[in-house]
Image (cartoon, rainbow, N blue to C red):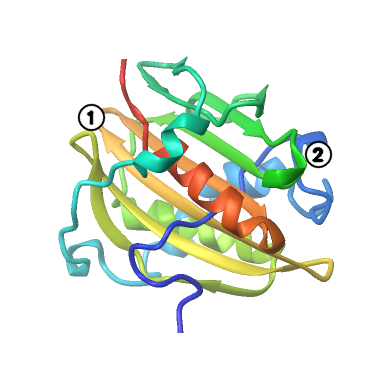
Amino acid sequence: MTPFPPGQPGGISFPAPSEILPECYSSSEMKRELLIGGLLAALSLAGGCGKNESDIPAGPAWAPDAAQLGALGDEHPFDRYQLRPPKDFKFVAVPLGAREVAAISWVSQTPDVGHGSLLGVIVSLKPDRPLQTYLEVAAFDLQKSTQDFKKSDAEKGSIQGKEFVRAYWSGRNKGSAVRGFIYVGRDRDKLIRMMGIMGESHQETSQPLLEASALTFRLK
């Protein structure tokens, strides 16, 4: 049984400094090297994980929930892209890793959507593997710091005409329930990863908001 029914929104974990991570994750357990550097270093481990990308049925064009648009802020540019982060979320730039050209995140500052709810975006150069491989490596790294880890099957779709795959996950860390989503897409010479994380107790507010924000992704 997958943690999220197909087509349902989710949350996600983004590699970022310890001060912007939810309290249930410590800096020692969720280091940037595992979640970002590991995406490249562990590619050889993930080549055979999950379904082959060609086995995933072609999906729909994904778009943000119109009911959430009023809770999103102005468009934020990064590299040759932009998206609308949630209003009142704090912007935090993240140091760039190997082959990365943009690494940014936004963290919740208000209790009603959960302190520490996080949305993050990474753009890197020259993706040379199937999108499914990058998705499985991201999940592999999350599993290292998440107990009772469960992940949905990958879904294929598009955002503003760009091909993406996505999956939802859930688990526990230090006794607290957490869940999230991972979107991985390709735009010519760029790989785009959009990820989010939230506590289970804030799912009803954080989950649709974070995913609506991610789905505003587009070219400038």
Residue type marked 2: Ser
Quadrant of residue 112 in the image?
A: top right
Q: What residue sits 41% from the left and 48% below the top?
A: 183
View extreme (bottom): residue: 1
Q: Are marks 1 and 2 in contact (CB under 8 Å)?
A: no
Quarter occupied by the C terminus:
top left
Q: Is residue 40 visible?
A: no
Q: Is residue 97 above or below residue 23?
A: above
Q: Is residue 169 above or below residue 109?
A: below
Q: Between tags 1 and 2, which lies in front?
A: 2
Quadrant of residue 54 in the image?
A: bottom left
Q: How many discs mark residues in the rendered view?
A: 2
Direction from residue 149 to residue 126 in the image, left or right: left
Q: Where in the figure is residue 206, as x and y percent of width and height?
A: 59, 49
Q: What residue sits 29% from the left and 42% below the top?
A: 63
Find residue 188 and name its label: 1
To which residue does mark 2 refer?
Answer: 18
Q: Is residue 154 above or below residue 207?
A: below
Residue type marked 1: Arg
Find residue 19 and name its label: none
Q: Where in the figure is residue 208, as x and y percent of width and height?
A: 49, 50
Q: What residue sits 20% from the left and 46% below the top?
A: 61
Secondary structure category for the residue under label 2: helix
Q: Where in the figure is residue 155, as x and y percent of width and height?
A: 30, 62
Q: Residues within 10 Å of mark 1 (few under 14, many from 20)?
A: few
Q: What residue sits 19% from the left and 70% below the top?
A: 55
Quadrant of residue 154 in the image?
A: bottom left
Secondary structure category for the residue under label 1: loop
Q: Nearer the viewer, residue 106 or 111?
A: 111
Alpha-carbon span between mark 1 and mark 2: 32 Å
N-terminal of the pair, mark 1 or mark 2, is 2
Direction from residue 79 to residue 171 in the image, left or right: right
